[in-house]
Image (tube, rainbow, N blue to C red):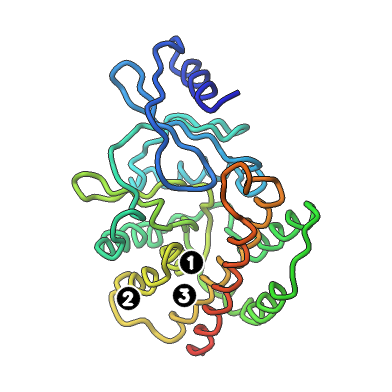
Amino acid sequence: MSHEAITKSRMAKHFKVSEQDIEVIDRLKGGMSNSNYVVKIYQNFFTFRIPGKNAFAFVDRHIEKATLDLIKDLHLDGNLLIDLELETGYKISRYVEGTPLMVLDPARYYDRASQMLKRLHTSGILANNDYAPFERLKKNELLVETEGIHHQPNYYDILNRFLTFKLFLESQIKVLCHNDSQPSNFIVRPDESLLLVDWEFGGNNDPLYDIACFGNNDFKYATGLLPVYLGRDPKQEEWLRLYLWRTFQCLQWHNVALYKEAIGLSQELHLDFKAIAEAYITKANALFETALSFQ
């Protein structure tokens, strides 16, 4: 069944209207994991999310729903959710006009992005689940190996050096985090206010993990955001955490890219996930070498 057919079928069922009354307008920009569509029903606009192939391997929809419930009073995502189908991950939300921050200049929005993240991190709200980065990485490694792909020596080389900081990173105080707060998940509305969307990876973690995520497209945006977030010059230890967490994220996305290559998404999405995976190893090495200068 095509994405348009799925969208019309599910939206018609939820809103109790005919599929003929539903118009799929466009696919939203941003994100390689999910497909999000703008949908018009009569004069009302919505978005409909279809998770990417095998998304269940990385995302627990019960955790996503629980996180959205936790943050309702913080109004970080505009409380857009209308319905989330836990079994499939199909999600219906209110549509708001806006532009993903990744296609603008993230540096212009340091103040607003840091205010949103601090509102989350200092809320005193804790999830029932930790993000558990190291357990998550091990799970991702097993997914790759189950698909018959063996990690190359260059992966274990950087991984083993990085793991010498495992106890240091695990010792940090944990707060509720977004854990995927990259610029593509910040939406700039016409009034210049921000929304933070896509809470699939919510859980307790070191707050500097979220700052590191902001450097997903270009790490200079993470290093630019950190002093604004802290409201002062970062300490050596804080720079160390930032660079280490981004190193970790590169190792994590290396495994995700390998898995996507293994299940055929390079061909389906016309993206070379094998090359993407290798690029993450190069980035991890460079970031780790800089991290060592902050010991």
Disc 2 crowd, CA 10 A, few/some/many (<14, 14-19, 20+): some
- Please name the residue that numbered disc 3 is placed on: 242
Picture coordinates of residue 143 (x, y %)? 73, 54
**273 or 248: which is nearer to us?**
273
- Please name the residue that numbered disc 1 is placed on: 209
- Please name the residue that numbered disc 2 is placed on: 227
Is 191 positioned to the left or the right of 77 in the image? left
Question: How far, Cα to Cα, is label 1 from label 2?
Answer: 14 Å
Q: Residue at x 38, y 72 (%)?
A: 220
Question: How far, Cα to Cα, is label 2 from label 3?
Answer: 11 Å
Amino acid at circle 2: Pro
Asked whether disc 1 touches disc 3, contact meaning CB atoms under 8 Å apart, the reply is no
Question: How far, Cα to Cα, is label 1 from label 3?
Answer: 7 Å
Per the image, label 3 sits on a secondary structure element best described as helix
Per the image, label 2 sits on a secondary structure element best described as helix
Per the image, label 1 sits on a secondary structure element best described as helix
**28 or 268: which is nearer to us?**
268
Disc 1 crowd, CA 10 A, few/some/many (<14, 14-19, 20+): many
